[in-house]
């Protein structure tokens, strides 16, 4: 058993992140007496509940199950959960335990931050994406009025229990999605980048993934610790995401992580045009991305470029777009472009690939 404790100091609230196997049958069992004393509710989604029902029910805590899927990251689910918290008599000293992917984590964190002006939350992320990214940093949200994450808060979980045994039931596509965020971190961290390059032939290997989780948590935690409320440095975590989101808006059958990988790829090409970059490194980054996507970037329909006009302009200021882009091993820069130039250059890059 390997246990890591990462304390996010310098924040109003503290989070302890524990990487440990079998958290449902071990860690939560150990916590059960204090959880029961203060009162607790388990919040999960229908897929996770179907797969882990026996272990969850063995805890003999009340459970609220939401229907799985981003389309349910809504105010209806949020208020149903808050109602379940009230009906189960949760108090100021009680704990909400969110067991699931980023959707469950984001809604659970939001409900915990709102209920009685804020109660404790334990995050048990069950997807690779949630373990390496969304469960760390205290961002909570629901989608609202058709806009992703429009309503949310910052609320640090008391504990995050990251357990790699959950990956055994995770579809390959969800692993690829999490790898997208891992490559995002690798674009900011040279040792992680080298590690991925050295292990290109076993990126979907469970043992490797189990080792990558604490490494990625450390990288994200360090960034978040320096900028908990996203006023500066933390924006580097948007690397690949501006273009990734533009692709995500039009390519409904690509996952978020796949779009981030494509976003990183295209943004590295933009960086080459405008900034001092390491060409050999950016070529390697491109190879890594193609390995994970299991497709040639050339295969992507260039027609999508036309749709980029739909790109959400509220992310831009005075028609300018600021992108965090990869430049050299472990280095990034902010690249500011006029929106019209960004759109035109992106089309050119996509068409010439
Ligand atoms: N708060 C943040 O900082 C932050 C960062 C990144 C992403 N997010 C949010 O995270 C969400 C995406 O998270 P996600 O990719 O985990 O999506 P998700 O929660 O929808 O999970 C993906 C799918 O996997 C299923 N699943 C979860 N764990 C499983 C397991 N162990 N075995 C089998 N199936 C399992 C889920 O039921 C779901 O169908 C988005 O809503 C995004 O906005 C938040
Ligand atoms: Zn992301």
Image (tube, rainbow, N blue to C red):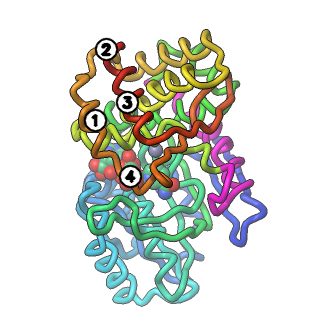
Q: Look at the numbered disc 2 and give the secondary structure of its residue.
A: helix
Q: Is residue 299 visible?
A: yes
How far apart, in angstroms, are the residues tagged by discs 2 and 3? 18 Å
* Residue 115 marker: none
The residue under the point 48% across, 73% down is: 96
How far apart, in angstroms, are the residues tagged by discs 3 and 4? 15 Å
Identify residue for label 4: 313
Instruction: Name the one closer to the observer, 174 or 335.
Output: 335
**Residue 123 vs residue 224: left or right?**
left
Q: Which of disc 2 and disc 1 is earlier in sequence?
A: 1
Identify residue for label 1: 254
Q: Which of disc 4 and disc 1 is earlier in sequence?
A: 1
Q: How crowded is mark 2: few (under 14 residues within 10 Å), some or many (20 or more)?
A: few
Tell me the quarter of the image containing the N terminus: top right
**Residue 316 vs residue 237: left or right?**
left
**Residue 270 vs residue 297: left or right?**
right
Tell me the quarter of the image containing the C terminus: top left
How far apart, in angstroms, are the residues tagged by discs 4 and 2? 27 Å
Q: Residues within 10 Å of mark 4 (few under 14, many from 20)?
A: few
Q: How crowded is mark 3: few (under 14 residues within 10 Å), some or many (20 or more)?
A: some
Q: Which of disc 1 and disc 3 is earlier in sequence?
A: 1
Q: Look at the numbered disc 1 and give the secondary structure of its residue.
A: loop
Identify residue for label 2: 298
Q: Where is residue 27 in the image (x, y as percent from the top left)?
A: 56, 58
Q: What stretch is highlighted in magenta?
A: 204-233
Please identify the residue farthest to the right as the structure is shown. Answer: 10
Q: In which quarter of the image is residue 187?
A: top right
From the Cβ of disc 2, is ligand 2 less than 8 Å away? no
Please say whether residue 209 is one of the residues in the magenta stretch.
Answer: yes
Q: Is residue 132 visible?
A: no
Q: How crowded is mark 1: few (under 14 residues within 10 Å), some or many (20 or more)?
A: some
Identify residue for label 3: 344
């Amino acid at each position: 058993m390997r246990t890591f404790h990462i304390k996010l100091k310098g924040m109003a609230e503290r989070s302890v992140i524990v990487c440990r196997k079998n958290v449902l049958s071990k860690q939560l069992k150990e916590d059960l007496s204090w959880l029961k004393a203060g009162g607790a509710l388990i919040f999960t989604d229908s897929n996770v509940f179907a797969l882990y029902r026996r272990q969850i029910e063995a805890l003999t805590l009340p459970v609220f199950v939401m229907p799985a899927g981003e389309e349910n990251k809504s105010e209806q689910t949020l208020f149903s959960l808050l109602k379940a918290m009230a009906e189960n008599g949760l108090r100021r000293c009680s704990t909400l335990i969110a067991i699931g992917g980023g959707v469950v984590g984001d809604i659970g964190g939001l409900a915990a931050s709102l209920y009685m002006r804020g109660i404790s939350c334990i995050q048990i992320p069950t997807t690779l994406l949630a373990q390496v990214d969304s469960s760390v940093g205290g961002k909570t949200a629901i989608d609202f009025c058709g806009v992703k994450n429009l309503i949310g808060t910052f609320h640090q979980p008391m504990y995050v229990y990251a357990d790699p045994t959950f990956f055994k039931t995770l579809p390959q596509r969800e692993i690829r999605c999490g790898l997208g965020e891992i490559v995002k971190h690798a674009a900011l961290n040279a040792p992680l980048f080298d590690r991925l390059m050295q292990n290109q032939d076993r990126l979907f290997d469970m043992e490797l993934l189990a080792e990558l989780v604490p490494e990625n948590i450390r990288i994200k935690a360090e960034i978040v610790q320096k900028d908990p409320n996203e006023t500066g440095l933390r924006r580097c975590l948007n690397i690949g995401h501006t273009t990734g989101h533009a692709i995500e808006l039009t390519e409904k059958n690509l996952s978020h992580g796949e779009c981030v990988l494509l976003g990183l790829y295209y943004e590295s090409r933009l960086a080459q045009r405008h900034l001092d970059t390491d060409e050999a490194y950016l070529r390697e980054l491109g190879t890594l991305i193609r390995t994970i996507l299991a497709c040639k970037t050339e295969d992507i329909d260039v027609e999508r470029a036309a749709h980029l006009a739909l790109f959400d302009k509220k992310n831009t200021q005075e028609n300018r777009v600021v992108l965090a882009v990869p430049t050299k091993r472990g280095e990034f820069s902010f690249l500011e472009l006029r929106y019209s130039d960004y759109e035109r250059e992106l089309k050119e890059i996509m068409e010439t690939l």
